[in-house]
Amino acid sequence: MSGDAALDVRHLTVEFIQRSGPKLRAVDDVSLTLYPGATLALVGESGSGKSTIVRALGRLLKPSGGEVLLGGRPSTLHRSDVREYRRHVQLVFQDPFASLNPAHTVAHHLARPLLLHAQATRRDVAERVEALLRSVNLVPPGDIARKYPHELSGGQRQRVAIARALAPSPQVLLADEPVSMLDVSIRLEILNLLDELKSERDLAMLYVTHDLATARHFSSEIMVMYRGEIVERGPSDEVILSPSHPYTQLLASAAPMPGATRSALAAARRTRQGARAVRDAERREATVETGCKFRRRCPHAMPQCASRPPDVETAPGHSARCWLFDQGAR
Amino acid sequence: MTAVGASTLLEPGSAGALRPTGGGVGHRAIVATRRLLRSSRMVIGLVLLVFFVLVAIVGPHLVGNPNAFVGPSMAGPSARFWLGTTMPGQNIFYQLVDSTSGTLEVGFLAGALATLVSVVIGIGGGFVGGYVDELLALFSNVILIIPGLPLIIVVASYVKSSSLLPTILIIAFTSWAGYARVLRGQTLSIRNRDYVLAARVAGEKTWRIIFVEILPSELAVIVSNFIFMVIFAILTQSTLAFLGIGDLSTLTWGNMLNVANNDEALTSGAWWWFVPPGLCIALVGTALALVNFGLDEILNPRLRVYKAPKVRR
């Protein structure tokens, strides 16, 4: 199966130097594989390192360790390699209001990557720009191309950002919370568009989100991230419907319940506030510690948790990094 | 007109008008000019400025020798001497016209030089970051805390030269620091914006990111800095000249004021000697400020609006 992987990430680690104190390990030994025509969802709370993974994979950050294989070949940080890499791996940013330059027209945003990666010549670039805009359902393309970003709505901007990412005809698309800044009413449109483009162009997609429902709907596999580590991974239905890791269980239960009563909501709010206090305290520590990082919030915490938990397979293709499932530990 | 007619009329505009990379510089220039003329401040400022520039270029060839002693001493305005004469009997109108080029030269050269230095140090340091940025920021802060005018006075009275060049250099190199700080701050905030990161992901080269992605966002600031620097340079040169420092052999409005003051035009009520140069300084300053406000309306991308192409009938 790994033979036809579009992007293979092995033992990726990203550390940040802090002004005082030890290094902050934002991404800790993460391995993942993206396959053409399939979406892998990366879920986790804010600050868990999701965006850092995307930025490291977008070659915007220098990873401290690990390797990235593009189409089976290792890709280094050499200038020519990065150029080739960017032709195949593209990124959609979270905030469409920030990711488009207010000083340039839509046409500029799309023409530049087309020309840079020799996807168009000066002569046919206008047609290629229109074709790109049409492929993300922005019509009439001629009018849209001449507009400035501030004249577009959030959804339109994100479509432009997606079109820009598609300009070099990449094989891999990294979408960093592509709909979190958009109105709820248009989120589904954008996600459906990404899904269609994925099938049409056989893209390997990494979908970063903290929305479990869309993660389940749009991806075939889900990885759950907690404080820089992948704590659980598996087929999306399995991970959402029968979560193994206590953290995934917590995430799943945190999803809002439309039918809840007032008192249930108040109780849920209290739990959330308690969890937030613990989370803030954890963030302040920010050290590279051994053992399970979730053990302070974990309802099942036990003495073994002070040492590094193993990845245990709970079902075929579904694994959790937790002592609970280790046969010998019980 | 029917609805069908309207929709077919829109077609040519939307299909033919897509110009992603500069295709149609002429068309763009027309659009820019039209936008320029929509701002009345811009129009007034530009008219004044163009007038002074024309006077600076053409004027000296049309008037006689401004230093020749041609008339009676301290005569008021008359048909022969439009703005009267000086104490030694020189034609003040000739002097006023001849001073324009020197004054504008100091303003624009010093302004351009100071802008260049502030752009290189501010944007360069801000974008590169690290030790280079720290050093450049330290350097601009040092320049910033040196009191400007006293330093200019000291240096200008030390350097003896019969041209305006030393004055220009001194004004330029004492006035860039504040604007360099402004630009550095802007660059630091823009450098890590998503659209700059997106340009890197798209594979843009570093210099292109600086010039095409970052610089346009700062263009409004840079141009407005430049214009204010020009005003500042003209005022500083006038101040220095009025104090009798720097090159007094080249005619500028400031030098005229200096001579007028020395020859007691102010106490004797010879208003025709000191009011015109003062008024000219004020008018040039006003013109530049108006152009600045007008440019802000045009360069600020948030004030820019897409106008649907007009439907031709």
Image: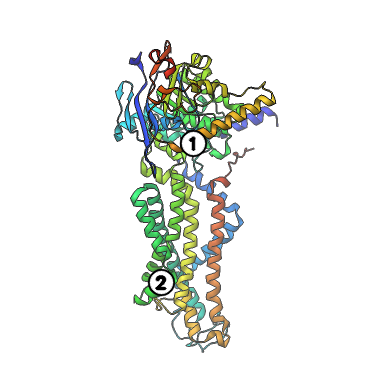
The x and y percentages for residue A173 are 43, 25
Q: Is residue A293 above or below residue B42?
A: above
Q: Is residue B59 above or below residue A328?
A: below
- The colour scheme applied to this rendered structure is rainbow
The x and y percentages for residue B139 are 37, 59
Secondary structure under tag 2 reads: helix
Task: Tell me the crowding category of disc 2: few under 14, some 14 to 19, or many 20 or more residues within 10 angstroms, Cα based.
Answer: many
The quadrant of the image that shows the C terminus of chain B is top right
What residue would you read off at disc 1? Answer: A281
Type of the residue with mark 2 = Ile
The x and y percentages for residue B204 are 38, 38
Q: Is residue A35 above or below residue B44?
A: above
Q: Nearer the viewer, mark 2 or mark 1?
A: 1
What residue would you read off at disc 2? Answer: B152
Most foreground residue, B287 or A263:
A263
Type of the residue with mark 1 = Ala
Residue A192 seen in render? no
* Distance (Cα) linking label 2 and label 1: 56 Å
Q: Quadrant of residue A121?
A: top left
Q: Is residue B31 above or below residue A51?
A: below
| Chain letter for mark 1 | A
